[in-house]
Amino acid sequence: MLRKAHVFGLLAAALAVAPAAALADQVQGSSSNTTQTSVTSGINNVTAQSANTRTAQQQSQKGSPFCNSGNQIQASNASAAQASALAGLYNVTGQTASTDTYQRQIAKAQGYLCR
């Protein structure tokens, strides 16, 4: 069985490691990176590359009967890089990339005392 001192020590460690979680904050982050590289040499070669990246984030937070507590923070970073090198005759390279990011936050305080 844990003593009160041990429980307090575990609680203090949890607060030090995850202060956002301890204060009822919601934090989300995402990073999407797409890199395409094509090297074509010879005669009559065709290279086609396609990439699609989709990121979705959603946070929901319902407050107490009196006031909503905590913050909602979302961040997203998306990048697409393409490179192509051709050597020879009648070579064709086609590259497409798309990046979609969807973020949604819902914070709902319940009660009439919050302003």
Image: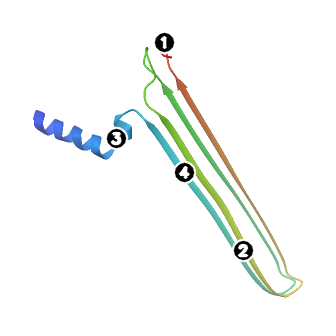
Give whichever of discs 4 and 3 has the lower sequence position.
3
Residue position marked by numbered label 4 in the rendering = 30
Q: Which amino acid does label 3 sit on?
A: Pro
Q: Which amino acid does label 4 sit on?
A: Ser
Q: Which is more foreground, mark 4 or mark 3? A: 3
Q: Which is more foreground, mark 1 or mark 2? A: 1
- In the displayed orientation, state which residue is furthest to the front: 115
Examine the rendering and report whether any part of residue 53 can be seen.
yes
Give whichever of discs 1 and 2 has the lower sequence position.
2
Residue position marked by numbered label 3 in the rendering = 19
Q: Which amino acid does label 1 sit on?
A: Gly
Please tell me whether mark 1 sits on a helix, a strand or a loop: loop
Instruction: Determine whether, in the image, residue 14 is placed left or right of residue 23.
Output: left
Please tell me whether mark 2 sits on a helix, a strand or a loop: strand
Picture layout, residue 100 above or below residue 64: below
Give the residue drawn at x 87%, y 83%: 44
Q: What is the distance, in whole Å, between disc 2 and disc 3 at their CAs?
A: 42 Å
Q: What is the distance, in whole Å, between disc 4 and disc 1 at their CAs?
A: 33 Å
Residue 78 image position (x, y, % from top left):
63, 55
Q: Nearer the viewer, residue 37 or 107?
A: 107
Give whichever of discs 2 and 3 has the lower sequence position.
3
Quarter of the image where one finds residue 50? bottom right
Numbered mark located on residue 111 in the image = 1
Residue 32 image position (x, y, % from top left):
59, 57
Quarter of the image where one finds residue 47? bottom right
Give whichever of discs 4 and 1 has the lower sequence position.
4
Give the residue drawn at x 30%, y 46%: 17
Please tell me whether mark 3 sits on a helix, a strand or a loop: helix
Give whichever of discs 1 and 3 has the lower sequence position.
3
Examine the rendering and report whether any part of residue 2 can be seen.
no
